[in-house]
């Protein structure tokens, strides 16, 4: 069984509309012989003659007149489909939780206004999961917090984001300026795989007291609600709590001399050419917030002494506590008592993920 092609239908519709091979040839840029061959193919496929060949002038037959409106409709729909998809693009990106919920929305709004024909899909998950989406070709690119170690991916620094310690306004430590007081606190943290959680664990690995991880949650909104109820402190991106701080629902703990920051990066697959629409979106992001530089040891998690204060070991053995032990809560001092002398803590500031 022979099937009609779009080319054959287009030729038939044009010739039938004008009932003249020369006129149709000028419109389509085809010779009379090519047009005649296509008409014969249409007739062979349908088993009917489309034109009356008994007269010297070209005239549609009854079967040709019946086919013409359907052929013209299909040609119009095909042209419309081509135009729709030629002007329509798809942008599929990933974002870690803080980036997707608090930083990307105004950028996406700007981009959507500039590209109204673009369909935008955003996958918001924790950093590890979003990086996996890029590696698995599930998204075109991603913007994430923290360090990306997958060597198969191309990572570009985008900007820095401040991290802050938050407390309920009536929490005993809400006005504390002494870093040593943090050893008495209970902590509510994001889930494993979250860059904010990883940055916190890296920084506190050098503390001489073990933070008590009271609760692990999978969203910033639940985390903020728990902190508002006075259940403990938390460490989050400043952008995630800006509204609550303005409304007086949360306070930022004003620790003396301590600056917490983490790096936000654009992640793409190495050696894969992105579509023009993806590059336009990333260019918009870079124009709005970056790019910025990162010092060589920005992920080292080292500590440095203030001024001329000599560096001291993190514990009696000169080693660091295991971040995984802190993360799992195995070392959590539930009584809130100090487990070691930390009078020197205020003279040792974390750098790396929590540094300016």
Image (cartoon, helix red, strand yellow):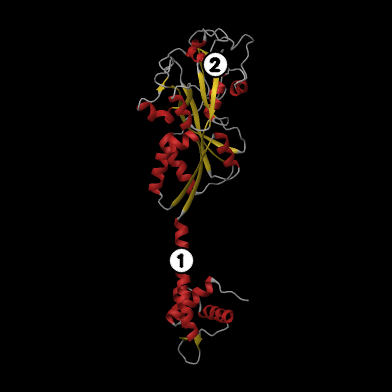
Residue placed most toward the observer, 246 or 215: 215
Q: Quadrant of the N terminus?
A: bottom right
Q: Quadrant of residue 4?
A: bottom right
Where residue 264 sits in the image (x, y, percent)? 49, 32
Whether residue 100 is visible to the viewer of this picture, yes or no, is: yes
Q: Secondary structure at mark 1?
A: helix
Q: Residue at x 54, y 25 (%)?
A: 215
Percent x, y for residue 97? 49, 35
Q: Nearer the viewer, residue 305 or 224?
A: 224
**Residue receiving disc 2:** 303
The mark nearer the N terminus, 2 or 1, is: 1
Asked whether residue 25 is in view, the answer is no
- Decide: marks 2, 1 in contact (CB < 8 A)? no
Neighbourhood count class around disc 2 (C-alpha, 10 Å): few under 14, some 14–19, many 20 upward = some
Cα distance between the residues tagged 2 and 1: 65 Å
* 208 to 219, vertically: above or below: above
User: What residue is pinned by disc 1?
Assistant: 79
């Amino acid at each position: 069984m022979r099937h009609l092609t779009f080319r054959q239908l287009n030729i038939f519709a044009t010739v039938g509309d004008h009932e003249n091979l020369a006129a149709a040839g000028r419109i389509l840029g085809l010779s009379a012989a090519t047009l005649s061959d296509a008409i014969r193919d249409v007739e062979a496929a349908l088993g009917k003659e489309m034109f009356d060949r008994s007269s010297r002038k070209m005239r549609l037959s009854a079967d040709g007149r019946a086919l013409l409106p359907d052929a013209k409709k299909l040609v119009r729909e095909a042209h419309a489909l081509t135009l729709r998809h030629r002007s329509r693009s798809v942008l599929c990106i990933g974002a870690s939780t803080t980036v997707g919920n608090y930083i990307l929305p105004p950028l996406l709004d700007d981009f959507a206004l500039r590209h109204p024909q673009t369909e935008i899909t955003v996958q918001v998950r924790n950093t590890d999961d979003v990086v996996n989406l890029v590696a698995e070709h599930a998204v075109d690119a991603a913007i994430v917090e923290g360090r990306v170690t997958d060597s198969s991916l191309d990572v570009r620094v985008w900007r820095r984001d401040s991290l802050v310690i938050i407390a309920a306004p009536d929490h005993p430590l809400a006005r504390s300026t002494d870093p040593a007081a943090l050893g008495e606190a209970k902590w509510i943290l994001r889930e494993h795989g979250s860059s904010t959680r990883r940055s916190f664990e890296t920084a506190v690995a050098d503390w001489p007291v073990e933070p008590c991880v009271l609760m692990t949650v999978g969203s910033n909104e639940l985390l903020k609600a728990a902190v508002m109820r006075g259940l403990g402190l938390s460490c989050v991106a400043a952008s995630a709590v800006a509204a609550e701080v303005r409304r007086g629902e949360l306070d930022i703990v004003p620790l003396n001399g301590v600056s917490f920051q983490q790096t936000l990066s654009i992640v793409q697959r190495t050696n894969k050419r992105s579509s023009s629409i993806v590059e336009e979106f990333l260019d918009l992001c870079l124009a709005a917030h970056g790019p910025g530089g990162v010092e060589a040891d920005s992920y080292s998690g080292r500590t440095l002494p203030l001024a001329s204060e000599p560096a001291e070991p993190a514990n009696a053995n000169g080693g660091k506590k295991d971040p995984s032990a802190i993360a799992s809560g195995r070392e959590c001092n539930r009584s809130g008592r100090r487990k070691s002398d930390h009078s020197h803590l205020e003279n040792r500031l974390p750098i790396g993920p929590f540094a300016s």
